Image: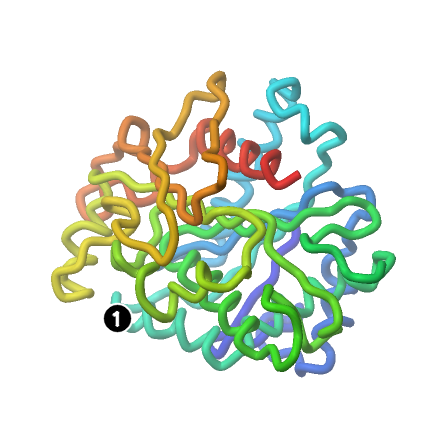
């Protein structure tokens, strides 16, 4: 698993963990740091949530990715579309300590200023250098080796991911109406092949209003946004209502409104396949209350998503992206 660190402004940090990488050097630094296996089939980028140390975020990412790898190795026949599945894992770490409003505003600012977006752009540019560029470009992020990109966030990490995707797209000038990375090559469209957020820390109606509605109103994603929720998430129940002046969170009750169709399903056992709606919904609420049940005094089930069933959801979405 590769680790990428951001500072409070969203700059990519050099390996020393102190100095920011200049914008023009992002691609070269990613080249050195990632050493992407060209035989990889799927790239998973994980962004952690609120009040998570570097050590804990590394542990959390490794735990989730191990669940995913182990589940696929145990039952590959349940995901026939993933034949030859060879994942490559990346964990993006960012300064997430502080009060609710402080971290909320930091997550937005990191992306609003475009710096986190440039890091993501650099990551895709790294892939772009390793693919044949057909005419026209592909409509999904897939290089000559068939690599797909899956973004996974937890809590405020999902907020950072979605904000960075929107910020990058808004910088398009005359490119196609899809997620593109103008700092690399604005002639070819890119989209994210799946976006999953465990217990997202935004108001339940966020996807019906700017800025988050832009994710659905424009073709930025090649898949629905999958959002888990459980009413046992105390961090996104009481504490989120205080921080957002009474608003319930997506991670507490699911998305209640959106600028597009919403489909709600249960978090399924690993032996039960998902049946995604056709035509696909833009939002998929995943009711995880049966499994995400931790009763920690402050956070409740907010971080109780490390289960094989969560990995099953990620693998099912990766398969659906084919």
The relative height of residue 73 versus residue 303 in the rendered view (above or below) is above
The reply, left or right, for residue 211 in relation to residue 276 is left
Observer-nearest of 180 and 305: 180
Observer-nearest of 31 and 274: 274
Residue 298 screen position, x and y as percent: 19, 48
Residue drawn 73% across the image and 61% down it: 33
Residue drawn 65% across the image and 79% down it: 174
The reply, left or right, for residue 280 in relation to residue 241 is right
The relative height of residue 298 versus residue 78 in the rendered view (above or below) is below
Residue 49 screen position, x and y as percent: 40, 56
Observer-nearest of 199 and 25: 199
Q: Residue furthest front?
A: 279
Residue 197 screen position, x and y as percent: 42, 49
Which quadrant of the view contains residue 262?
top left
Q: Dot 1: within a 10 Å radius of its alpha carbon, few (fewer than 14), some, or many (20 or more) residues?
A: few
- For disc 1, the marked residue is 101
Describe the element under mark 1 as helix, strand or loop.
helix
Q: How many marks?
A: 1
State the colouring used for the structure image: rainbow
Residue drawn 45% across the image and 54% down it: 48
Residue 237 screen position, x and y as percent: 18, 50
The relative height of residue 80 versus residue 214 in the rendered view (above or below) is above
Which quadrant of the view contains residue 39?
top right
Q: Quadrant of the C terminus?
A: top right
The reply, left or right, for residue 315 in relation to residue 125 is left
């Amino acid at each position: 698993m590769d680790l990428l660190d951001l500072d409070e402004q969203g700059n990519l940090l050099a390996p020393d963990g102190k100095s920011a990488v200049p914008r023009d050097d992002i691609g070269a630094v990613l080249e050195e740091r990632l050493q992407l296996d060209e035989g990889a089939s799927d790239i998973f980028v994980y962004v952690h949530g609120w009040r998570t140390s570097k050590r804990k975020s590394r542990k959390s990412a490794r735990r989730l990715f191990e669940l995913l790898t182990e589940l696929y190795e145990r039952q590959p026949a349940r995901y026939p579309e993933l034949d030859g599945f060879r994942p490559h894992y990346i964990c993006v770490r960012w300064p997430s300590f502080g009060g609710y409003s402080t971290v909320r505003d930091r997550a937005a600012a990191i992306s609003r200023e475009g710096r986190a977006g440039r890091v993501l752009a650099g990551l895709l540019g790294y892939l772009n250098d390793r693919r044949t560029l057909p005419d026209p470009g592909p409509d999904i992020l897939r290089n000559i080796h068939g690599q797909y990109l899956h973004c996974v966030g937890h809590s405020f990490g999902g907020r950072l991911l979605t904000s960075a995707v929107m910020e990058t797209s808004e910088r398009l000038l005359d490119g196609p109406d899809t997620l593109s990375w103008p700092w690399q090559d604005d002639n070819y469209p890119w989209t994210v092949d799946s976006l999953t957020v465990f217990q997202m820390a935004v108001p339940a109606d966020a996807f019906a209003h700017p800025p988050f509605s832009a994710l659905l109103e424009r073709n930025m994603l090649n898949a629905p946004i999958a959002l888990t929720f459980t009413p046992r998430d105390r961090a996104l129940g009481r504490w989120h209502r205080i921080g957002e002046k009474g608003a319930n969170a997506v991670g507490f009750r699911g998305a209640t409104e959106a600028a597009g169709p919403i489909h709600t399903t249960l978090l399924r056992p690993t032996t039960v396949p998902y049946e995604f709606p056709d035509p696909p919904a833009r939002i998929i609420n995943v009711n995880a209350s049966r499994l995400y049940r931790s009763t920690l005094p402050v956070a409740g089930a907010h971080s109780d998503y490390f289960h094989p069933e969560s990995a099953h959801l990620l693998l099912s979405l990766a398969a659906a992206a084919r």
